[in-house]
Image (cartoon, helix red, strand yellow):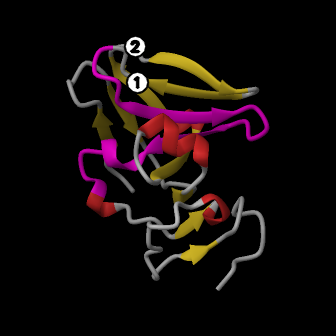
Amino acid sequence: MNKPIQGGCLCGAIRYEAKGTPVASTLCHCASCRRASGAPSLAWLVFNEDDFAFVAGTPTVFESSPGVLRTFCGKCGTSLTYQRQTKPGTIDITTATLDHADDFAPTKEIWVGEKLAWESLNGMAAVFPASSKASPNT
């Protein structure tokens, strides 16, 4: 992608920009993402860390589990990013906070082993019972 991908929080206090091509586009069903977002699942767009920057405001950082840092807007609470020490060099951005989120449909659903029973899978994406490093369950 040539033009920057932009997004931000609900109140507009935090804005970010990403460049380049996303590494992955996922929909996560893990309990941690559900609780952090207050939603039944959470869509992520993954970028190389060097291709991402906050361009307005400073998000609040929360270590949601050992070695996992999540950012959110301290004013409106919007969940923004996810990084883990075991996967250095990348940053996950909450897809729904993108200005043009429709352009980035998830290509895989991960952690479906923790999926809420009443949420449906999309049927168009590869499905993984845990991390996408496992074999797809089709």
Identity of the residue furthest to the left in this view: 11
Whether residue 39 is situated above or below residue 58 in the rendered picture:
below
x 48%, y 55%: residue: 21
Q: Is residue 69 left or right of residue 34?
A: right
| Quadrant showing the N terminus | bottom left
> Distance of mark 2 from mark 1, alpha carbons?
7 Å
Give the side of residue 90 with respect to residue 27, left or right: right
Amino acid beneath label 1: Phe
Residue 100 is inside the magenta segment: yes
Residue lying farthest to the bottom in this orientation: 138
Q: Which mark is residue 54?
A: 1
- Contact between marks 2 and 1 (CB within 8 A): the answer is yes
Towards the viewer: 69 or 120? 120
> Viewed as shown, does residue 71 lie left or right of 89?
left
Looking at the picture, how far across and down is residue 10, in whole percent?
Answer: 23, 31
In the rendered view, would you say 28 is above or below 98? below
Q: Which numbered tag is attached to residue 58?
A: 2
Image point 41% across, 40% down: which residue?
38
Residue neighbourhood size for the residue with mark 1, other residues' Cα within 10 Å, grouped as few (<14), some (14–19), many (≥20) = some
SS for dot 2:
loop
Instruction: Count up the numbered dots.
Output: 2
- Residue at coordinates 46% horizontally, 82% vertically from top-left? 123
Q: Which of 89/67 is in front?
A: 67
Magenta span of residues? 75-101
Q: Which mark lies nearer to you, 2 or 1?
A: 2
Instruction: Give the image quarter of residue 91.
Output: top right
Mark seen at residue 106: none
Task: Give amino acid for label 2.
Answer: Thr
